Amino acid sequence: MNTTAKGNKLEDALFDYLIEQQERGGRVYGLYPSELCRIRKKPKYDCPQRKKPVEFDVVIEVYREGAETPHSHVVFECKNYKSGIPESRVTDFSDKMGRIFGHSVKGILVVSSRLQSGAENIARSRSMGIVKFSESGADVVAERRHRYSVESAFVKSQIFEEGHRVKSLKFSAYFDGKFFNSMGQLLEYFEQDPAEKSSGGSDRVSVPYMSTEDIRAFATEILEGIGYKEGAVDLRKVCEAMSLDLKSSRTTVFDEDGTLILGSANFDRHSIEINEHHNDFRERFTIGHEIGHFCLGHGTYLRSETVIERDLLVDVETAERFDFTRLELQANLFASEIILPDRVFRLAAEVGCRRLKMRDIGFGYVYVDDKPWNYQPYNELLTDLSQYFRVSKQATEIRLKKLGIVNDQRRYGNASSTKLIGEIFANFQTDIH
């Protein structure tokens, strides 16, 4: 795909996104009545200096009540680059806007991937905004009325190169030294007077945090509702009971970092789509993860989201006010409870221990160390439980440890559960050894 085609693809995606936001009804972005906003793609404006029209990628024209001409413009220049934008592109865009609109304009560069940190200095010097738009990213609910927001550090890592990667957002923006996770927030900032801008941000609503005990009780109630008794949980039945539309696709989709997307959820449509890649165990955990997002009410904060492998590795609790890591952790806890039900899992472990003649001889119900006569029956127990519940041996081991059933004294037995969860998804083939 050539540069022009790539740029057009980004323009089309951004334009469709803006139109979708406008068509949701009510006041556009929480600021303007729909009839006072016009979103245009590839509009042309007369330029007296060049004596011919000048074209821009996407423009939002904002009108005052009763006015025939817009009083302000938000102009988007789409650059589908993989690296930093050259300074010449920024200055050319700025000069072009100045010739057409004067001072009644806000210029925004739209990119599909992260920029080098030097782009921040260019944006400051030319008073430009930077937006990163990703069709496959999580779409945050951030309406003006509710003030749901994302930490600035999280949004910054979307746009500029950082030492680590984080979950992709559909929309993230930088302007005037501040970071925004929705178009509404950005446009609202444009409309504020200087005193409001310097007074600090608005109050944010924190994400409710459900305890493990409450998540377990919730999952148990759902399982009882579908008549679950034993064995692998029928996750399609769970989706049917919750009126969730579960679909499968063999499409291979990657995010802007080249990371495989395992599945997605759309909270408006009440749907889950799983990308099949011949790994039944991982697909089941992904489904459980997405069901967790719905059950835990995360549609209050997200319109849609995607699952990548990093999301399924989250196992660290955090008390931050609004942190996507926190949402993923809660979804993972729910997935464990729905796929490895507490009562049945404990009973299956007990039966397995009796079959393998594993007894508590003073070191715990299930004791394992590096000695073959202790490790071998333990490994057989993991295999039995893994096959019974159709989940990986590593996920089974984590569950045993979280329930306090295992006393692991192997040299690597104190490895963090994050590392163990990582092993679940390290291989693409189902673990049946």
Image (tube, rainbow, N blue to C red):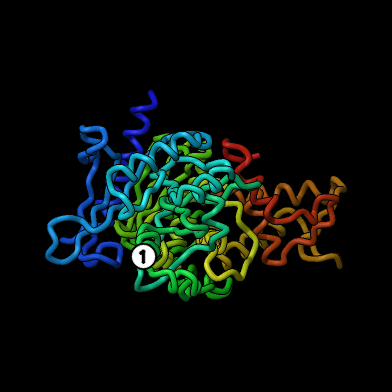
**Residue 377 appears in the picture as rendered:** yes
**Image spot of residue 337 (x, y percent):** 54, 63
Q: According to the image, label 1 marks what residue?
A: 188
Q: Quadrant of the N terminus?
A: top left
Q: For the point 59% across and 47% down, which residue is it?
A: 165
Give above or below for 117 relative to 211: above
Mark 1 element type: helix
Q: Nearer the viewer, residue 30 or 421?
A: 30
The picture places residue 214, in percent across and down from the top left corner, at 53, 75
Could you tell me which residue is drawn at 46 percent across and 47 percent down? 126
Badge 1 amino acid: Glu
* Quarter of the figure with residue 271: bottom left
Q: Position of residue 78 (x, y in %)?
A: 37, 39
Is disc 1 surrounded by few (<14), some (14 to 19) or many (20+) residues within 10 Å?
some
Q: Is residue 323 above or below residue 213?
A: above
Indicate the quadrant containing the C terminus: top left, top right, bottom left or bottom right. Answer: top right
Left or right for 130, reference 166: left
Viewer-nearest residue: 337 or 363: 337
